[in-house]
Each structure stands twice: as structure tokens, then as C-alpha cells.
Amino acid sequence: MWQFLTLSLLVSRATALVRPDGVGRVPALGWNSWNAYNCEIDADKILTAANEVVNLGLKSLGYEYINIDDCWSVKSGRDPTTKRIIPDPDKFPNGISGVADQVHALGLKLGIYSSAGLTTCAGYPASLGYEEIDAQSFAEWGVDYLKYDNCGVPTNLTDQYTYCVPDSTDGSYFPNGTCVNLTDAAPANYNWATSTTAKRYTRMRNALLNVNRTILYSLCDWGQADVNDWGNATGNSWRMSGDITPTWSRIAEIANENSFLLNYANFWGYPDPDMLEVGNGNLTLAENRAHFALWAVMKAPLIIGTPLSTIDQSHLTILSNAPLLTFHQDPLIGRPAYPYKWGYNADWTFDPAHPAEYWSGPSSAEALNGTLVVMLNSQETTQTRTAFWKEVPELKDLYRRGGGFRVRDAWTGNDLGCVRDKYSVRLGAHDVGVLVVGEVC
Ligand code: GAL
């Protein structure tokens, strides 16, 4: 049985999309225009973001992609002769290549956006049927990352069946996450890798693999068509949910959903719970902290989505957290942290308002030297959360009754000394404690 399981894991990982130069091996770090500016973008805003990534010290922490989202092109259509998408000359007077040159000169990389349909979500020309031409343009312009959305799909290319995404309105679901009541659900043995959605995304993958430039491929099909099954062979990351909003309820809901998908996350392929909202809306500091910590330990792509020229120091501090970023970018351990206890709920409970509260994962980094332990308070009032060493999978074999570990608080950097048996923390509503648990003491 174990042999079989190990083999099937190896087989499934062997199909991951492996790219040159380690591109996409660990989850991406960067910035994207959408959550910050929606359609209101231009070269100045993109270059300001790039410069701020350098000035604020984010580049030296590993943030590298500066990604242009929807609304960058001439809306009325492609060049009638070349059939290329035309960068909007008002927004991007030096084209996308002009921006790419400047972003590259800062030692950063440039990302762009299109859709596996006829139009993007905001109604701009998209790449279905033009995959080769567009991949070629992106490569010539110096693009390093493509986010590929799922809007503008013509009716003759919609899927035969509906796949139930828990946060969509496609079907209702039981509290444990099992979908019911889908009138057009697929038969049990249906292979979603043969769906038209998978085919639309595969066409662009093949086009990208045929150009003379390594372009990270980020799928954005919102979790549809069982993308977890074929996303790993198709792209470097794949959105597993609908859009995030800067609200705690949405962040908790997506974290809950993604917590059940973490066996899909490892080197070269990551489920993507959407871009960061740190710094946006009315999220409290605690909520910003919890959002970032959960995304980092789930090894989500960490794509900042707030205007960097006006960012608060407190939000910048969260995005700059060294232990979390070190864990996230681990060069030797690909797996994320997993929940080891749900806490508020019984284990394995699917609850959009109360994701798992206790998480742990191993790190190979000398700076961390051990295990990251995360404790979340998913409740609306201040609560105590306690990590018992005997319950933490990475620690329990080393733990002896009355024994301790050297512990650091990842937010304050404070050395908490030799902590015996357990560590308790008082957490405000939606706050998170992050511990770096080191050697036995
Ligand atoms: C959505 C996508 C968002 C953003 C938007 C642009 O489909 O999930 O992240 O890219 O389209 O219109």
C-alpha cells in the first residue's frame, strides 16, 4: 500500500511542468496591478511599483515579478495585418517592451495578462486562437510571466459538464466540501484533463514552450474543470478559487478551501489562492498578518496587490517577514505547511468562516533551523491558542515529556528561550501567531 502511494505521488509529480533556470520551481514573489488599480493602469504606475519594490527592500527579499494585469491593450482589436495585440499607446507610450526594458534594468522581471477566450474579463482582445502570435509578441517584448484568465470563452468551447468549485454558485455543497445538486455534474470517472478548459490552457502552454524565452505560466481558471488534476502539468501555478476581496470573510473562505488542496503544492506547481490584499480595504493589522502568514505557509504565489508608493510601514513589515519568506522560498523542501489540527472545529471540517487554526511545516533553512508553527484565531474575540509539541508532526518524535525546544516569535524576532511542552499565545480576532521552533533543549 505504502509503496503504491509513494509511486503514485512520484508519478504525479513527474508530470509537473519543469522550466529552465528554476523558473517556477518555488512559488513566485512579486507585485500585480489588479488589486491595486484595476483597469486604471499605465507605464508610470507599473514602473513606480518596480522602483518601489527596489527602494522598499522587497527586491532584496526575493520579490521579482512586476505584473501588468487586465486593460493594457487597445480595446477595439488586434492589428489588422499582423493580428498582434497592440499595447495601448496612451497608457504605454513605449509599448510593453519599453516597460520591460526598464523593469529588467532594475534587475526585476515583467509579467503580463491575457485570457483563454476571445476577450479578457474587462473586454480587451484575448488569446484564444492567437496563442502562437501572442506568445511570440510576449517573448519579443521581454515578458517573463503570463497570467492567463478564463473570460470570453465562446459557447462552442464551454465544457460539457460543470465542475463544482465550492465558492462558486455552480452548485451547493455540504459542509465537508462535497458538492451536490449539480444538474450537469460529470460522471465519476470523467477525466477533466480532456475538457475544453484544459485544452484551451494547454494550447497556450504549448505556445509558450515554443518561444525562445522562459515565461512563467500562471493559470487563472478560478478552480474550474478540476484544474488541480491537470494544472501541474500545464502551468506553474493555478488559481483554485474565484477572486479574492480585501475582506476577512473572503480570505478565510479561500484559506479554508486551499487547505484541502495542499497535497498538490510542491516544487514546480502550486495551487494559487489569488493575489495578496495586504494593505487594502479595511483589513485590520491582525487580518493582514493572518492573510500573509497563511498564504506564505501554503506556498501560494505571493503577489502583492497594493499601491507601493503609499504603503503603510506596518503593512510593509508584514510583507517583509523574513521567517515566512524563508519558509516560502525553501530550496530543498517543496511541500507547504499543513494543518495538523483544526482547533475551532473538529479536524478536516470544511468551514468557510473557520479555516484550520494549527499549521506546521519543515524548513531546511539554517536561519529557521527547524519547524514553522502557525496558530490562527479564526474567532471574532480574543482567544488563547496553544501549540503542544506532542501534537506537532515535525516535533512529536523529538519531544520527550517535559522536554523543550528553542523557540523564536517570527513577528517580533524575540527569542522565547527553551520552551517546554507547549506554547500558548493570546490572539486578537483573526490574528495569527508564528513560531520558529528550533533544536531540542
Ligand atoms: C479576473 C481575475 C482577476 C483579474 C480580473 C481582470 O477573472 O480572477 O484576478 O485578473 O479578472 O479583469
Image (spheres, grey):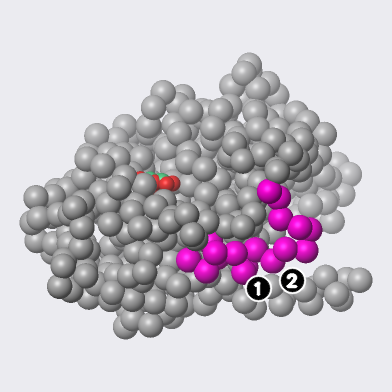
Residue at image coords 21%, 70%: 83
Residue range (magenta):
184-200
Above or below, 28 against 34 in this view is below
Residue 360: percent from the left, percent from the top?
A: 69, 48
- Say whether residue 421 is visible: no
Q: In the rendered structure, find residue 13 and report the number of the disc placed on it.
A: 1
Q: Residue furthest right?
A: 1
Q: Image quadrant of residue 171?
A: top right
What residue type is disc 1 on? Answer: Arg
The Cα atoms of the two marked residues, 2 and 1, are separated by 6 Å
Which residue in the structure is indicated by mark 2? Answer: 9
Residue at image coords 53%, 61%: 197
Q: Is residue 343 part of the magenta span, yes or no? A: no
Q: Image quadrant of residue 54?
A: bottom left
Q: Circle 1 sits in a helix, a strand or a loop, which is it?
A: helix
149 on left or right of 432: left
257 on left or right of 411: right
What residue type is disc 2 on? Answer: Leu
